[in-house]
Amino acid sequence: MRLRTEPRFEDPDAVYAALLDAHRGLDAAAAQRLDAKLVILLANHIGDDEVLREAIALARGTTLPERR
Amino acid sequence: MPTTYVNPRFPFRRPAALGRGTPEEAVVVIAGAGLVGLTAALDLARQGVRSVVLDDDDTVSFGSRAICWAKRTLEIYGRLGLGRRFLDKGITWNTGRVFFRDSEAYSFNLLPEEGHEYPAFVNLQQYYVEDWLAQECEASGLVDLRWCSRVERVEPREDGALVAVETPEGCYRIHAQWLLACDGARSAVREALALPFLGQVFRARFLIADVVMQADLPNERWFWFDPPFHPGQSVLLHKQPDNVWRIDFQLDWNLDPEAEKRPERVRERVRSMLAGAGGARGDLPFTLDWVSIYTFRCRRLERFRHGRILFLGDAAHQVSPFGARGGNGGIQDADNLGWKLAAVLRGDAPDALLDSYDVERVPAADESILNSTRATDFITPESETARAWRDAVLELARTQPLARPLVNSGRLSRPTVLKDSPLSSPDAGPWEGGLPPGAPATDAPVLRDGQPDWLLRHLAGSGGFTLLCFSRAGEAPAAPPGIARVVVSEQEAPGALWDHSGLAARRYAAAPGDCVLLRPDQHVAARFRGSAEPEPDAVRAARDRALGRAAAPLRREA
């Protein structure tokens, strides 16, 4: 596994708040585009397909089915 | 009706076999006198092979259809003697512009490298190409073009195929030793053999319109995602010769395609596009030449060879447009098959060589289908999520070059490298860069007796193999019998092509003494480092392998 998964944020609450703040006032569609852009920007910054694939697998693997 | 081009009407000529009880005998019969069938016929004729071509119609393509001819296609037509006509008549373009909603997101330049005879793309209506091909086929004296001749039944046999042909004056039968099915997406030959043609149909439909107008727009490809004049959909504008413009409108899946094809409806769409595109041109007069509707689909036959019947072009594989892969792919099929069939007919190669057509062209079709599917997913996103990602990429592309490579308005066709072909001989040692075995040869400017010339023009010796030798001043080993030799030199030397710019050596990553063996379709069969002087035996062995004479099996694993 190349993806670093140990906790690395200095101020996790501030990171979380910054992510949420970025979505303020956006409808669901615009919020989804914003998320997509964040992913593209960060993925490009990392610039490593393998790390990205590991992250995709981890995200997908931890996604719970819809509650019925 | 087109106003800039009049379709020729070819006469029906009564064949001698009509009314005879016994079938006519032919070596090669080609079903379909379209782009691919005519290209195959001309390629065979250039190698001295006769063919009979059957077509149910009496004219060339109606409407512009395939309009984007890629560099490799132009090189193939260069080999067949038609290349200059594309350059003289066609529109050469390099710039593409992508618009998102009401403004330009970015533009790109295909940046054609200097030092090639042919550009990245030329736009030209398909009817011109078919017209020229038909003329050349006639002029060759080796192609028997039979118009108004419909393939009615096909009976595969051990020794060929028995084809029943229907004509205005009755039916006759022709027995072909080899039958090439080039009869398009609705191939009668494929249907006669009841072969499954499987793949994916997309919920994406486009209206194509050929519009004649005097527009002061540049020679560029313009692609709109979600423009104000056609909200939620995509639009493409492309220039052709004779002031004909191709406009493709994506149609909402729920619209009735027949109603959308009505001229007044199409004119309305074109008017609003002109009013909204690149400055107000809403009052620009135009005439509508041709309208068609197509649904995006990607599918192919499992195998392209069925005994003595071979499938080429849309009859074998169909892709969505926006990548110029239909026409260009079909032409590469003909390019791949022509020399192989000629070699088998001459007795130079075993029948098994034709298995390699399937081995080499099926992956090429899959590559096209993969590219086309990805473009379709971007152009016509099928879910809310897919659309959000698509729009996010486009929003970002406006200011961020990093997002631009993700924009997919059609990846433009590149020549197929025949990776892992059983006909290729692997490099004996390491070879950094250049053209690996299986790659199509690359052009370079050269001087021949002081005159400007092009390398590729010398690598097509009428259907034979060529040994391309790199030298300092014309010194080169002799080529084995039956293989033509072309010598490229660093310094001017008599009898050699002078690589005055050094581009040939650079593009092949070759030093003096190195040699490259090229197949008749200009793909690399093998290459030899000169430090160990290429032994005639190694060159001969590579040629034999490329002719399927080696023991290695040429079939794909099932």
Image (spheres, rainbow, N blue to C red):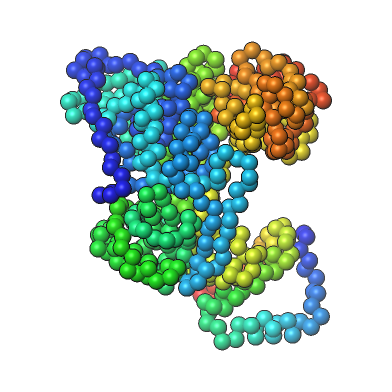
Q: Which residue is drawn at 49% across and 35% down?
A: B83
Q: Quadrant of the C terminus of chain B?
A: top right
- Of residues B49 and B279, the one drawn nearer to the viewer in this rendering: B279
Q: Position of residue B268 (x, y in %)?
A: 29, 66
Left or right, B132 with reference to B546: left
Q: Residue at x 23, y 28 (%)?
A: B12
- Of residues B179 and B442, the one drawn nearer to the viewer in this rendering: B442
Which quadrant of the structure image shows residue B256? bottom left
A59 in relation to B415, above or below: below
Q: Where is residue B389 in the image (x, y as percent from the top left)?
A: 55, 68
- Of residues A22 and B98, the one drawn nearer to the viewer in this rendering: B98
Q: Residue furthest front?
A: B450
Q: Which residue is drawn at 67% across and 69% down?
A: A41
Which quadrant of the structure image shows residue B155? top left
B259 in relation to B170, above or below: below
Left or right, B9 with reference to B141: left
Q: Which residue is drawn at 76% across and 63% down?
A: A3
B44 in relation to B322, above or below: above
Q: Where is residue B266 in the image (x, y as percent from the top left)?
A: 30, 62
B110 in relation to B156, above or below: below
Left or right, B16 with reference to B484: left
